[in-house]
Amino acid sequence: MRITIIGAGILGKDLASTLCNDKHDVIIIDNQAEKLDTLRDHLDVMTYNGNGATSQTLKRVEAHQSDLLIAATGSESTNIIACQIAQKLGVTNTICRLSSHDLFSPEDDISPESFGLKGIVIPELECVNKIIDTVENPSILEKIRFSNPNAIMTAFAVKRSSPICKIKLADFPNKNLLNSIRIAAIIRNGRTIPPRGNTTIKKGDEVYIAGQKEKVEKFINWATETPPKSQKVIIAGATIIGKHLAKDLSEMGNQVRLIDIDRYKGEALLDELDSNMMVICGDTTEKEILAEAGINSCDIFISALKDDEDNILSCILAKKEGAKKVVTITNKSEYNDIVPSIKMIDCGFSASLVASNSVLRSLTRAERNICIEAALHRLQSYIYEFQVTETSPCKDKKIGECKCPKNTTFGLVFRKDEVLSATGDLKLLAGDIVATIATKETIKDLEPLFINKGLFRR
């Protein structure tokens, strides 16, 4: 498939990398030549230096021949105009990156269609939803959703009081519950441990479980402490993400306090939300400001500042000063491997990965050779979904008979509306979708099980 990406920022770069690996022809447009030079040094992409929101530029790159155009710049107006022009030139499918729903007004009949937008993604809201997933239960570290809406993977931290602490999987006290889900991975001291019958779950382990939503939630409720109805939450930063978090968490009944160094931003947020939320003016990297906000009795501290380094420092300081759980947001891809290794940070989410995932999920399966559903923020791995076809080498084979590469795990199998655990005796049929956990390095060894290279067309 031929894909045109407008914007060589963090999101554009991540998308270009993923889609190139997915065997697509990618052309990326940006008005900063230096960014394009860097991309060409690392990726097999075509580039064009120019303004992607003009018909002249889109004509020069023959955008009308693209199967898909993704407008991924940081400017909403640029993205909207680029998609409108591209559609006028004959591009059938477009995806427009926005930062909120504020442009639209259902009561006034102003919708994305009013702007001629066929597909939109709002990464900031995706990031907010991922963070809220971890706020609902203090033990939850991450939730991952799949193409099948009935399936989910949840990571949680094992506490001393958990009924699975110090238990061997072979001696699991609730066999029916264990058999209803799939333990996909265990992280201990930064290392991934493959779950086996003789594996003992220990305090501090991070356990990934996958399966049907209802069964996973039942397992989580059994294995973790009952979450409090209302929590004390401190948010750093009146950014787009910070504002949405403050609004949503307040409406959920939590006691929310927001800290921002800009007094006017804080006051504007109070006027906008019309709530009893407390706003404190100050720098969250200063101990005195955190103390004023009540950090020593804080259940959850979330740093949503624009600067990655300030986010990380604020979280470490908040944890040191008494916050029970700290969540950080980063933007630079360089921090994807670093944040999970920082023990004082409970949860870290990469805004760029969330943005990339949201765009990839908006593509149909027919538009992707391999479906990447999510980048796991703590495992430094990815969820890949492969479809078993009539020509797949693994068709009609049991999972146990497939030579699964090292450091990869078969998690779930989606068979029409069914969500099945990927056990060794499950036979793979044509039409099945197999969700796997793998790294970018091991995915190449996994592809031959599903893709007949002799029939593969780029």
Image (spheres, grey):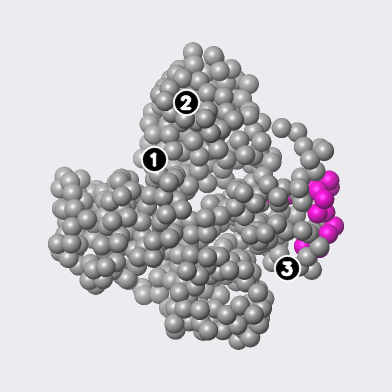
Q: Amino acid at mark 3?
A: Thr
Counting labels gives 3
Residue position marked by numbered label 1 in the rendering: 99
Question: What amino acid is labelled 1 in the image?
Answer: Ser
In the image, which residues are magenta?
Answer: 386-399
Q: Residue 423 bears which disc, if any?
A: 3
How far is disc 3 from disc 2 in space, using C-alphas?
46 Å
Residue found at x 38% / y 31%: 75
Sequence-earlier tag: 3 or 2: 2
Q: Which sits in the foreground, 45 or 432?
A: 45
Q: Position of residue 387 (x, y in %)?
A: 73, 49
Could you say which quadrant of the image residue 54 lies in? top left
- Residue 362, by quadrant, is top right
Q: Residue at left 45%, top 18%?
A: 50
- Overall secondary structure of the magenta section: loop
Instruction: Say if 453 sits above or below 157 in the image.
Output: above
On-image quarter of the N terminus = top right
- Name the side, left or right, on which 431 lies relative to 280: right
